[in-house]
Image (cartoon, rainbow, N blue to C red):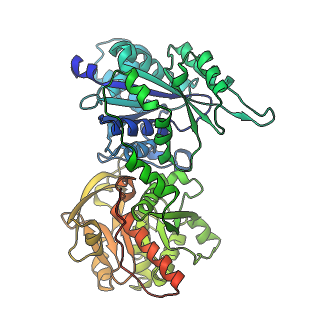
Amino acid sequence: MSESAEGRTKYIFITGGVVSSLGKGIAAASIGRLLVERGLSVTIQKFDPYINVDPGTMSPFQHGEVYVTDDGAETDLDLGHYERFIDESLSQSNNVTTGRIYQNIITKERRGDFLGATVQVIPHVTDEIKSYVRRLSEGHDVVITEVGGTVGDIESLPFLEAIRQFRQDVGRKNVLFIHLTLVPFIAAAGELKTKPTQHSVRELMEIGIQPDMLILRTELPLTEEVRRKVARFCNVELRHVIESRDLETIYEVPLRYHEQGLDGSIVEALGLETREPDLSDWESIVKRVKRPSDPPVRIAVVGKYTSLVDSYKSIQEALIHGGIAHDTGVEIDWLSSEAIDVQGESFPDRYHGVLIPGGFGGRGVEGMVDTVRRIRQDDVPFFGICLGLQCAIIEFARNVCGLGGADSAEFSPTTPHPVISLLDSQRQVTDKGGTMRLGAYPCVLQPNSNVLAIYDQPEISERHRHRFEVNNDYRERLAAEGLVFAGLSPDGGLVEIIELSDHPFFVATQFHPELKSRPTRPHPLFAAFIGAARDRRDRQSEGQVGSSTALEPAELP
């Protein structure tokens, strides 16, 4: 990248202190949204200090959802927030881990790229980190970088040193440091305490970084006295001390930041000339989430990792987006498929729709299969995603086609009917990380299918993360009993979507449509699913039996 190109781009680095999980990702995404509304081209990246190359092999109970980009990167769930808020597709370069940094450096060292030099944290590690910031500069007015972890963590030190150097490299006027920290309320004292924030900023300053702005997470409103105290002791202008309270919806955060002038302060500090933001459409979205005009629908998500909702973060948000499309509230119950399987828990009748999400391994799968049988027979709207599609295939094969013992080769290698089998491309794979069928692939929708009417276009592109697929040896048998293969790969070799035409809504996908849903552009499948759930709710309230196909969403702002 040329010096002039780098000089035109501005950089914002967001750090966190005191405790983890304060919401740096939401803060970065919200700032990104405000700058986009000002007409700027923005991208956001995440630095993760763990040594894993990516989160692809990490437990969802530890890390939450693995978010997949179009180019097949397995990334942190915060990238989902970034994409949903700024409405831009991100890439491999937008999520960088310590593991990836060291992997790159060791590869270069083995190749002889360092010409015999001793490889050290400074300058080699810090230079590699800075290169990932620079490579996003082209075509963007602002690059926002969230530094994962907490100030004081030993793992974060190379990243903090790198961003300290970066400000020196590109000039102070081109870089802004924003620090997110906690102001806890001590009930016994009846006070908000600023000392943790002071200590956090002091530790950051010892590293050589003076934050330009502070975002303070708090349960209670900050008094003017508290804000002045923080500004004084942390060497920050009073107007640059921003309150961040818990809100009903994350989509409200940009509005609260704007009320306090955060975006105006940012563009002023970076010397950017922008228009004033028009947040009326975003305000309408927030209103549809907080105070929808239509009563809520009740959705059951039956999954393997429901004890940690962050494992299905994009599912949760996409369902909310489906509600936005219809100006309808969405209430989600997270049900353990393992409880249904092992404990024999009955499936409640009170839901207007059921979604079965992705997952790996056989635990809880029989609970999912039994759930599919129940809702297929009872005409409950059903949406299956990845493993959800595979469970629907297994259930249909067993109970409609009469293929006793039908199963996935992943769960039962000796099954007499492996209706789900390993992808041919996966048979020689031995490494686990980054080796699945990942990223965006095209899908051709079949004529006269329900999904063709929902998408309203003959070919789509969706993101994938799987190793197993529908076994083509059984497609003819399944189709003969009424299962519709509504979406296929362009060569016809891979099943991407199935549906039942005689059901109010029965759709399952091998891909992950939740990854492309946005509050401004709800995914059509989620909008259609919530529409079908709304229709079931209305029929129940009227005491009617039967189905409806009225799936058109309300007009978005």
The picture quadrant where one finds residue 462 is bottom left
Rendering coords of residue 61 (x, y %): 56, 49
Rendering coords of residue 147 (x, y %): 47, 30
* Left-right relation of 250 to 384: right
Q: Is residue 322 above or below residue 118?
A: below
Rendering coords of residue 278 (x, y %): 36, 42
Q: Is residue 3 above or below residue 104?
A: above
Between 375 and 110, the one nearer to me in the picture: 375
Check the image and name the residue furthest to the right. Answer: 188
* Left-right relation of 161 to 346: left
Q: Is residue 111 above or below residue 299?
A: above
* Image quarter hosting the N terminus: top left
Is residue 108 visible in this depiction of the protein?
Answer: yes
Between 173 and 357, the one nearer to me in the picture: 173
* Left-right relation of 476 to 387: left
Q: Residue at position x 40%, y 21% from top?
A: 269
Q: Is residue 90 above or below residue 446?
A: above
Between 287 and 467, the one nearer to me in the picture: 287
The picture quadrant where one finds residue 162 is top left
Q: Residue at position x 52%, y 44% from top?
A: 63
* Image quarter hosting the C terminus: bottom left
Q: Residue at position x 38%, y 85% from top?
A: 401
Q: Residue at position x 42%, y 14% from top?
A: 122
Rendering coords of residue 490 (x, y %): 19, 63
